[in-house]
Image (cartoon, rainbow, N blue to C red):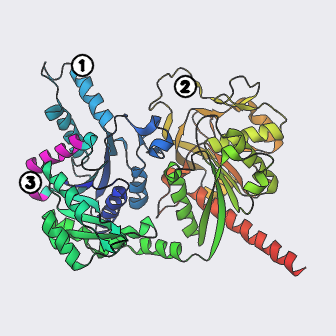
Amino acid sequence: MAKYIFVTGGVTSSLGKGIIAASLAKLLQARGLKVTIQKFDPYINVDPGTLNPYEHGECYVTEDGAETDLDLGHYERFLSTYTSQANNVTTGRIYQTVINKERAGDFLGKTVQVVPHITDEIKRRMLLLGEGDTYDIVITEIGGTVGDIESLPFIEAVRQLQWELPDEDLMVVHLTLIPYLKAAKELKTKPTQHSVKMLSETGVHPDILVCRTEHPLNNDLKRKIALFCNVKTEAVIEAMDAPTIYEVPLLMLRQKLDLICLKKLNITKFEEPNLDKWKGFLDKLKYPKSKVTVGLIGKYIELQDAYKSILESFVHAGAINDVQVEVVNVHSEYITQQNVSEKLAGLDGLLVAPGFGLRGIEGKIVAVQYAREKGLPFFGICLGMQMAVIEFARNILGLKDAHSTEMDANSTHQVINMMEEQKKITMMGGTMRLGSYPCHITEGSLAHKIYGSTEITERHRHRYEFNSDYLQQFTDAGMIASGTNPQTGLVEIVEIPTHPFFIGVQYHPELKSSVENPAPLFVGFIGAAKKYNELSSGDKKKSASL
C-alpha cells in the first residue's frame, strides 16, 4: 500500500503549493520511488472546463480527456509522467457523486451529511491512486488556504486519515509565509504561527513547515518557528524566492526536504538522486548563448496563468536551442491594420494563442496576415490555427466573408465549422473533443521534419474544425493539410510550404511539453525564430557596413 503526503497552505494563496508538491515528487522520483500527485480543489464547479481563464488560469487537459487544474501541468512537466481524471478532484465532483448515490438509494434512507458522507467520499478519492502497487507515494495538494470555509471538508478528511492510518503511512507538509517588513528590517513569524494554530485547531498537525521567504532564515528564527509551531527544528524548511520554478527541486534537495519525508514515512530503501539531466537543463536555461523575441498574441494576456503551459513550453524549447526566449504579450483586441507593424515590430516569431469567443478575433487575423506576408515564423494553436485558415481564405482565396460558425453563423464561407458530433450537444462541461488523438503526418512536410515521424498523438480541446469542403481550394492556393486524424479525416495541421516557417495545429502541443521532453513544435518554432533573428542581425550588420 502507498504512503501519503498532504500539502496544505496558509497565510495567503499563490505561495506555490503546486511547485513545492511537484519539487518534492521530483526528488522522491529521482531516488527511485514511484510517485504521483493529485490536486483537490475546493470550488463547486465539477471541473475548470467552464471557467473563464481570468477566473482560474488555463484549463489543463490530460491524456484521458479530463479538464483539470493548471497545477497538473506542473506535475507532468516536473515528473515527465502523465496524470489522469483521478488526479484532480473538486468539491463539485464530490457532491455530485454523493448526491447521485443518495438519489439511487445507496444510503438506505439515512440523512446525508458532510460528516461522514462527504468526508468519506473525499477519503475514498484521496486513497484511490494508492491502491495496488502502482505508486509508492501519493502526494495530495489541498487547494485554497487553511481557514477557508470551502476547504474545511478536505482538512477534516485529512484529520480522519491521520487517525485511521498508521503514523508512518501519512504526513502533512504545510506551506506558509514569513513576510519581511522593510520598515522594521525584520522577518516576522507571527502569520506562520497563526496559520499553524488554525490548522491544529482542525485536528491536523503539520510534520514539516515549508516557509516562503524573500530573505534567509537563520537558525534562531528556525528554532523560534519550531518552538511555537511544535515541529522539529530540522523540519522548518527555508523556501527562498528562486529565479525560476525549475530551481526549486534543487533548493529543496539542499534543505533535505525529501530525506525528512522519507524518515517520517519510514522508507529506508532509496537511491542517491540523479538529477544530472535536470541540472543540465538549468545550465542551458541560466546561460543562454543568445536571445529571441516572440510575440504571444492572445486575449487573456492580463493573467499569465491563462497561457501557463505555452509559457513553460517556451522555456523548455529555449533551453534546447540555447536561447533566452523573451515573450512579448500583445492583446489581440488592440491590433488593427493601421498599427500592426508597430505592435509586432522587433519580433522574431509570432504565436497566436488558443481561446474562445468573438472578442479579439479580427486582431488575431491581422497578426496572422502580417506574419505570412513578412516571412515571420508563425505558429498557431487551436483557435490560432483556425485564424490562419480564415486569413488565408479571405486574403488569398478571395472569400472576403470567410469565418468560423463560432463567430459568424451567417457567413457564406464557413471555412471553420462545428464538428458534426458536437451539433446535438447542449451541456457545456466536459463535452468538447478532449484528450489524446492520433494524427497522421504527410512525409516531407514541415511537421514531418519537426516530429521525425508520420504517426503522432497530441491532446485536443475544441468543438470546431477545418471545413474539408474547402480543402482542395486551400491546397491549390498553397496552404496544405499536412496532418489529419486517420479515423475521421479531421485536419489537424496546416502549413504553407513556401513560407520559411508557417504552421498551425488544431491540438495543444504545449500540454505535453516537459523539462526532459520539450514539445517538438515549440523546439522547431524557437529554432526558426533563432534563425530569423540571426538573418535579421546579419542584414542589419550588412546595412550598417554599407
In the image, which disc is placed on residue 166? 3
Measure how far apart labels 1 and 3 are at the Cα level: 35 Å
Quadrant assignment, res 545? bottom right
What residue do we see at 49% from left, 76% from top? 283
Label located before the other in sequence (1 or 3): 1
Q: Position of residue 29 (x, y in %)?
A: 31, 64
Q: Is residue 404 left or right of residue 61?
A: right
Measure how far apart labels 2 and 3 are at the Cα level: 50 Å
The chief SS type of the magenta part is: helix
Amino acid under disc 3: Pro
Measure how far apart labels 1 and 2 are at the Cα level: 30 Å
Q: Does the CB distance between marks 1 and 3 fall below 8 Å?
A: no
Q: Which residue is mark 1?
A: 103
The foreground one among 63 and 42 is: 42
Label located before the other in sequence (1 or 2): 1
Q: Position of residue 106 (x, y in %)?
A: 18, 22
What residue do we see at 69% from left, 59% from top? 349
Tell me the crowding category of disc 3: few under 14, some 14 to 19, or many 20 or more residues within 10 angstroms, Cα based.
few
Amino acid under disc 1: Arg
The foreground one among 115 and 120 is: 115
Q: Is residue 158 one of those drawn in magenta?
A: yes
Q: Which circle, 1 or 2, is nearer the viewer?
A: 1
Q: Is residue 102 one of those drawn in magenta?
A: no
Q: Does the CB distance between marks 2 and 3 fall below 8 Å?
A: no
Q: Which residue is mark 2?
A: 421
What residue do we see at 26% from left, 47% from top? 129
Q: Magenta span covers which residues?
A: 152-168
